[in-house]
Amino acid sequence: MLIVMNHNAGKKQIEAIIKAVERMGFAAAPIPGSERTAIGVLGNKGYVDDSTVLALPGVKEVIHVSKPYKLVSRDFHPRNTIVKVAGIEIGSGKRPVIMAGPCAVESEDQIMKTARAVKASGADMLRGGAFKPRTGPHTFQGMREEGLKLLSLASRESGLPFVTEVMSPDTVDMVAEYADVLQVGARNMQNFELLRELGKIKKPILLKRGMSATIEEFLAAAEYILAEGNPGVILCERGIRTFETATRNTLDLAVIPLIKEMSHLPIMVDPSHATGRRSLVPPMAKAALVAGADGLMLEVHPDPEKALSDGPQSLTLQGFDKLMKELELLISFLGS
């Protein structure tokens, strides 16, 4: 339920509504707006009788929201959320943000070379994995904290803030000490204990859609983070598992405009994991921007043939530079 106040409602009237909601056994979440304040009612599992609230001074109307994701919904928060990372705005609608780098940090030389190259080509942020969830236990699992240190070194030298994955609640503090943005991978989208821990920190979270997750499940996962007090969530579409086997996943581009209708959170696209094929990344990256994505997450490696993780879907440094030049033309056209 969403309680919309009159534009001239005072502080005492708003506080009275909050106390009334709490007496009903629910939590109240004030949502200040440019013209009026709204108060979200959280914790109800069914219809709430609004007659008591409607009778209170200052109340304009009550909107019943049946969605399981209330804080994430546009009903609760009509304006777009802009997530700021080291001066970079994600979700502002002005310019898409490009995150680029290797799937996994493998060595100092590899991550430094990549960071310098993607910076020179125009990337806004560096990406790279220190902790790697892999299907098989005998494959490369990442350099862990040493990888975080190398990412931090590359970030400082290149001037690019970086995003990296966190896999478990007990490593949240460690990753947050180094990273500018903490990523939740597809396999962990419904790791609710991890989501709750990420909701307690003050750094932005990039939440990837689970490979078999519905849009409602995706947004409900984001709700876990917001419900703990962290509003800085960036959604990321990375493809879903379907019956098709020609590509690694099926890239659901329709999710971009649909989520923008349903939620105020920014949404990016990862065409590398979505397709699994280097040749398909550039056209899908362009298609994502045309569909309205707030940014792209691209895998880039100085020598993909020798990559310890996801080499076939990683762009070469030269390929990334070529794509960035093409994206600049597209961005200029879309903005005209």
Image (tube, rainbow, N blue to C red):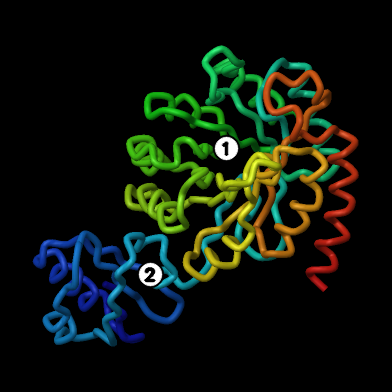
Q: Position of residue 282 (x, y in %)?
A: 81, 48
Q: In screen coordinates, is 133 left or right of 312?
A: left
Asked whether the beta carbons under mark 1 and mark 2 sit within 8 Å of each other, the answer is no
Secondary structure beneath dot 2 equals: loop
Q: Nearer the viewer, residue 63 or 190?
A: 190
Q: Position of residue 279 (x, y in %)?
A: 82, 42
- Residue 182 as seen in the image, left or right of residue 50: right
Examine the rendering and report whether any part of residue 158 can be seen: no
Q: Which mark is residue 123?
A: none
Q: Position of residue 87 (x, y in %)?
A: 64, 50
Q: How many marks?
A: 2
Residue marked by disc 2: 76
Camera-side residue of 24 and 280: 280
Above or below, comparing residue 305 to residue 270 in the picture: above
Q: Residues within 10 Å of mark 2 (few under 14, many from 20)?
A: many
Q: Position of residue 321 (x, y in %)?
A: 88, 41
Q: Quadrant of residue 101?
A: top right
Give, as a three-letter code, the residue at label 2.
Answer: Phe
Residue drawn at point x = 84 percent, y = 40 percent: 320
Question: Residue, x 60% and y 36% (percent of image)?
Answer: 163
Secondary-structure class at tag 1: loop
Residue at numbered disc 1: 180
Q: Quadrant of the C terminus?
A: bottom right
Residue 170 vertical placement versus 198 (above, below): above
Q: Quadrant of residue 27?
A: bottom left
Choose between 17 and 218: the one closer to the eye.
Answer: 218
- Looking at the rendered image, the disc whose residue lies closer to the viewer, 1 or 2, is 2
* Label 1 to label 2: alpha-carbon separation: 27 Å
Residue plotted at (14% across, 77% down): 49
Q: Write down the quadrant of residue 270 in the picture.
A: top right
Image quarter of the N terminus: bottom left
> What's the residue type where badge 1 is placed?
Asp
